[in-house]
Amino acid sequence: MEQYIIKGGNALQGEITISGAKNAALGILSAAIMTNDTVLVENLPDIGDINVLLQAIEEIGAKVERVDKHSVRINGSKIDSMCIDYEFIRKIRASYYLLGALLGKFKRAQVALPGGCNIGSRPIDQHLKGFEALGAIVKIEHGMIKAEAKELKGNHIYMDCISVGATINIMLAATLAEGVTIIENSAKEPHVVDVANFLNSMGANIKGAGTDVIRIKGVEALKGTEYSIIPDQIEAGTFMFAAAATKGNVLIKNVIPKHLEAITAKLIEIGATVEEYDDAVRVSANGTLGHTHVKTLPYPGFPTDMQPQISATLVTSEGTSIVTETVFENRLRYVDELARMGANIKVEGNTAIIVGVKGLTGAIVSAPDLRAGAALVIAGLVAEGFTIVEQVEYIERGYENFESKMQCLGAVMAKIDIEDEKAVQKFKLKVG
């Protein structure tokens, strides 16, 4: 087990390149098995979640060839198992995309029922409703979701609530269904669009991705393709808030500024400066930042995956800010950790009331989930003295080379073995 140790107080300066989008990659890698031809996927982030999904794909018989850290070739012609066991679902919920992919290609699939999640429950009823609308018989037996159909037929599907996972899963299954499928009230996130663009590059006929109505005309088969994944808007947003919180000046490269508009708007509102370029943004701040009100919403609203990071920035901003979480009920679990560092936060239901303080002090804190872990690192960069962030395995599920990217910007931090008792003292002596 490893942990981060951080000495706060340095303004982040320099430039950073953003990796491929984790959430897009998970859907795209699942879709890649739907053809018998070879598919090349580039700009993959080299992170834990991606590596686990590739193991799951190999486990069912697909050929997976790592070209390099960020590229992979997949051939699904030799798949001999329709079953994804709980070991993979336990490590990474997005393994359930293989349910839609296998159902679409083979008309049957069996995937372990996902367990709970640290940020809250994520029901899969909309996924199952969509599969049933396409003609599949879906049963839950012995902890497994079993879906089977003699044939899949297009249908009109209205989503009771906006769900990125269900939108992608239904889109995967419908791609090889007979006739036309219309998904209404669909998710509009950039990674939904990227999965649709990838499927279209394989010969699918999908229109409307990025709007609330997606139309899919089923095709008989998909073909091989070469595809590069979009940049990760959440990684970009994390570095944007880190730059602002530390009163730094950072050029964040390999981004799509349009995808960052909700994040950019809040940064400008609290007094940071954001300059947009074709494929980069520069974030800078000096002096005390101001307060704001934030409510998480589906895209193009403020992303739930950025809620902890903006809160970590607002704890040392002037005035009272209100952050309301509308997507996941347990997403404020990191608040107690920030309070250990001196933050003044009160939680009422799904709302955090943040009264800005002049500064934070270092403490030993524990990451309860992926994005909260990144937020605690931001707080550590701002705090006086030394902060130790435990359970960094959560962070490394979704951020590639997180500590080295921060180091490139001047952050004084390192990753050390939790059992190496002398490592903390060595770090403190080294940095002074």
Image: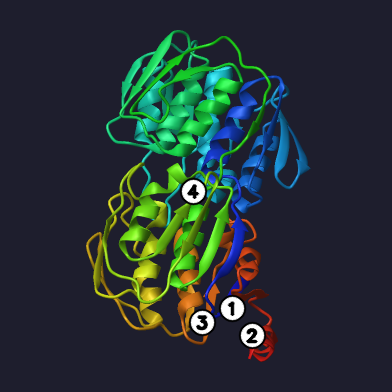
Nearer-N-terminus badge (4/2): 4
Disc number placed over residue 9 in the picture, else none? 3
CA–CA distance between discs 4 and 1? 26 Å
Q: Nearer the viewer, residue 375 or 220?
A: 375
Q: Secondary structure at mark 2?
A: helix
Across and down, in percent, residue 311 comes to 36, 66
Quarter-of-image position of residue 17: bottom right
Look at mark 2 in the image and give the residue it sits on.
424
Mark 1 element type: strand
Q: What's the CA distance linking mark 2 and mark 1?
A: 7 Å
Of 376 and 350, which appears nearest the observer? 376
Q: Earlier in the sequence, mark 3 or mark 4?
A: 3
Q: CA distance from mark 2 to mark 3?
A: 18 Å
- Quadrant in the picture for the C terminus: bottom right
Q: Does 124 appear above or below 407? A: above
Q: Which amino acid, mark 2? A: Val
Q: Which residue is mark 4?
A: 233
The N terminus appears in which quarter of the rendering? Answer: bottom right
